Image (cartoon, rainbow, N blue to C red):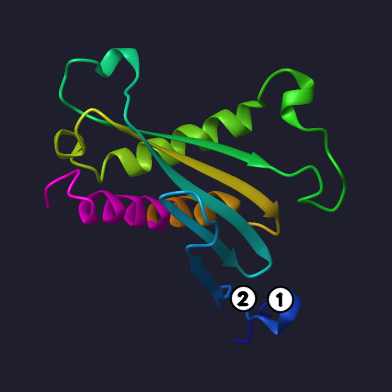
Amino acid sequence: MTTNQPTYARTQGRGASALRPVVITRHYTRHAEGSVLVEFGDTKVLCTASVEEKVPPHKRGSGEGWVTAEYGMLPRATHTRSDREAVRGKQSGRTQEIQRLIGRSLRCVFDLKKLGERTISLDCDVIQADGGTRTAAITGAFVAAHDAVSWLLERKLVAA
């Protein structure tokens, strides 16, 4: 018995089960405590991690830190230009969901007590979208957060 297997044609000649090439460029920007340009194939996401010596109101006095994330796409990250969400006056449900996903994914790998009462803010900006922006953002945010924690350790602001 012969079965007809569908033939998949992908850009760049990538097979149906082949992963996109992944490139992570650390220290991509100058000012952030951690920054990464992550590339999953043609998807490119800039992720920065900023350390702030403050926590949200619900964490004040707890001795614990916080990790939060923001996510956005440049207007021409896709085939057609879209308005910036700031112009529309509110974020889409998709953007809110992805921000929460990044924040929750990374908060669960932190010992918030060891972080002390400080916040690591992760900013993920899609500069070119070709699929997989969520996973690229989570990966880039993790590496940027790691570099921000290394920055804290080097300055002896947190203990190992």
At numbered mark 2, what does the secondary structure look like: helix, strand or loop? Answer: loop
Q: Is residue 132 visible?
A: no
Dominant SS of magenta comes to helix
Residue type for callout 1? Tyr
The range drawn in magenta is 143-160
Tell me, yes or no, whether the two marked residues, 2 and 1, touch with CB atoms within 8 Å: yes
Please, what is the three-letter code of the amino acid marked with disc 2?
Ala
Q: Residue sitting at 18 percent across and 40 percent down?
A: 111
Residue 127: x, y in percent?
A: 69, 53
- Residue hosting label 2: 16
Question: In the drawing, what numbered circle is on residue 8?
Answer: 1
Is 80 situated left or right of 16 in this image? right
Vertical arrangement, residue 120 with respect to residue 125, above or below:
above
Image location (x, y in percent) of residue 79? 85, 53
Mark 1 surroundings within 10 Å by alpha-carbon count, few (fewer than 14), some (14 through 19), many (20 or more)? few
Residue in front for this viewpoint, 125 or 1 = 125
Q: Quadrant of the N terminus?
A: bottom right
